[in-house]
Image (spheres, rainbow, N blue to C red):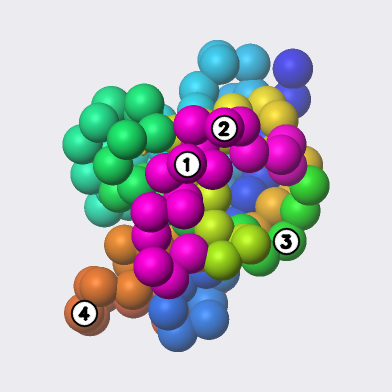
Amino acid sequence: MADKQFFVEWPNGIRTAHQVPSDMGLSLMEALKALDYPIEATCGGMALCATCRLEWLHGDLPEPGDAELDMLDTLPDAGSASRLSCQLRVTDISDGSAFRVYSLNMIEGDKPKVQHG
Ligand code: FES
């Protein structure tokens, strides 16, 4: 199976492109951690902590399940674009999807100034 490409948007609006294998059964949280994004994922992917939160910007993805919806309902600033990356499989999102990693909003400095792969 081919690699899948997605874009992570930084708080300054710049998007970084990544290509990851779509045949390894990885969740998006696992893929992002492997790419060194600062995702705590303290519950280990059980939809219990929301530290893996994303704001979806573009692309098709499956509807959230009950566990994900229950967790998102506890977040005061979650909206219809909010998702938990641990509940999404790389294989299930459309190629070229784009999203913002919520925890990147808390980071100062070291933001990319150009798009790269
Ligand atoms: S890793 Fe805890 S909710 Fe996703």
Measured Cα–Cα span from mark 4 to mark 2? 34 Å
Q: Magenta segment, which residues?
A: 61-78
Residue at 63%, 38% in the rendered image: 64
Tag 1 near tag 2, CB within 8 Å: yes
* Among the two numbered marks 3 and 4 on one chain, the one whose residue lies closer to the N terminus: 3
**Quarter of the render that holds ligand 1:** top left
- Residue 69 belongs to magenta span: yes
Figure quadrant of the C terminus: bottom right
Q: Secondary structure at mark 4?
A: loop
State the residue at coordinates (68%, 27%).
91
Residue for badge 1: 70
Callout in the foreground (4, 1)? 1
Task: State which tag comes first along the sequence, 4 or 1.
Answer: 1
Q: Nearer the viewer, residue 87 or 94?
A: 87
The crowd level at tag 3 (other Cα within 10 Å; few <14, some 14-19, many 20+) is some
Find disc 2 in the rendering and name its residue.
66
**In front: 42, or 109?**
42
From the viewer's perspective, is 76 left or right of 1?
A: left
Q: Are marks 4 and 2 in contact (CB under 8 Å)?
A: no
Residue bearing mark 3: 58
Task: Confirm if mark 1 falls within 8 A of ligand 1.
Answer: no
- Position above or below: 107 against 48: below
Label 3 – label 1 distance at C-alpha = 23 Å
Looking at the image, residue 45 sits to the left or right of residue 116; the answer is left
